Amino acid sequence: MKKLIVANWKLNPPTLKEAKKLAAAIVRKSKHVSVVCPPAGFLSGISFPRLGAQDCFWENRGAYTGQVSPVQLKSLKVKYCIVGHSEKRLLGETDEMVNAKARALLEQGITPVLCVGFGTKVEQDDLEVTDILKTQLEMDLKGLDASKVIVAYEPVWAISNGDPLATSKVASPEHAEKMAIFIKHRFGVGKVLYGGSVNPYNAKGYLDQPNIDGLLPGGASLIPKYFNQIINL
Ligand code: 13P
């Protein structure tokens, strides 16, 4: 089955030239469907069949210095947009903001890739994690058509510092599958991805799970050799 692999480049690379080179190195014909999320400043300079953004604002115009709106993303042919990433929540993004962003994206026909898993701890059991996800998703998805939202389960403790082979902390595929089942059944979410230290060696374990519809790699998406391997597993 074709799965969805969303590359989150985060704050990389430093120049447009390097970003173009990175996008060009990703194979266009692959077993799975790939999406590239470059930094916002590079979105208009990159050519890739499916583009995603890493964040957006919830208003489409007005006196909001520094923001990027869903309507602007739409004009750049952006089809997906990450919201609620742990690295944004750490800087103060609230569930109310995540909800407003996801709503504004859906109004423009852009699919939100809503990240949950902030606040989870490695030692927590499945039940404790589902409690956290439930609280987050009740707020994040409030009033939205959940079937149009992609949820990425990214346990915050499993996110790498950028080294895709530093696999000391990863969620097991079995745990990720259980969380995916919970998210789908409880909230009617269409697709669930897993993210957190995904690399070419552990990716298949997640892709083999029937309820995990794809992956959200960070560090590994910056290395074309690794990303090309993942999208062809
Ligand atoms: P890593 O794959 O580097 O752990 O990053 C995951 C992530 O945060 C993707 O959004």
Image: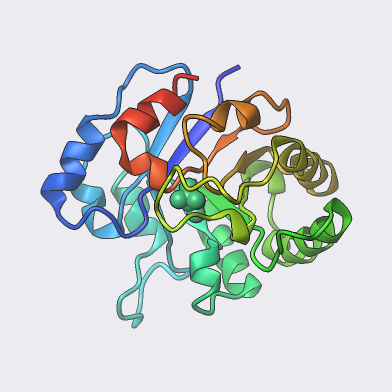
Left of 44 or right of it: where is 145? right
Q: Residue at x 40, y 41 (%)?
A: 220
User: Residue 132: which quarter of the image?
Assistant: bottom right
User: Residue 97: which quarter of the image?
Assistant: bottom right
Q: Residue at x 36, y 26 (%)?
A: 228
Q: Is residue 29 visible?
A: yes
Between 161 and 73, which is closer to the camera in this rendering? 161
Q: Residue at x 70, y 48 (%)?
A: 146
Left of 84 or right of it: where is 210? right
Left of 1 or right of it: where is 28? left
Location of residue 184 in the rendering, given as x and y in whole percent from the top left corner: 77, 41
In this rendering, the answer to whether 11 lies above or below 206 is below
Location of residue 44 in the rendering, given as x and y in whole percent from the top left corner: 21, 49
Left of 39 or right of it: where is 205? right
User: Residue 134: which quarter of the image?
Assistant: bottom right
Location of residue 216 in the rendering, given as x and y in whole percent from the top left corner: 51, 43
In this rendering, the answer to whether 42 lies above or below 88 is above
Between 19 and 197, which is closer to the camera in this rendering? 197
Location of residue 36 in the rendering, given as x and y in whole percent from the top left corner: 36, 40
Q: Residue furthest right?
A: 127
Q: Is residue 47 visible?
A: no
In this rendering, the answer to whether 141 lies above or below 76 is below
- Rendering colour mode: rainbow
Between 64 and 4, which is closer to the camera in this rendering? 4
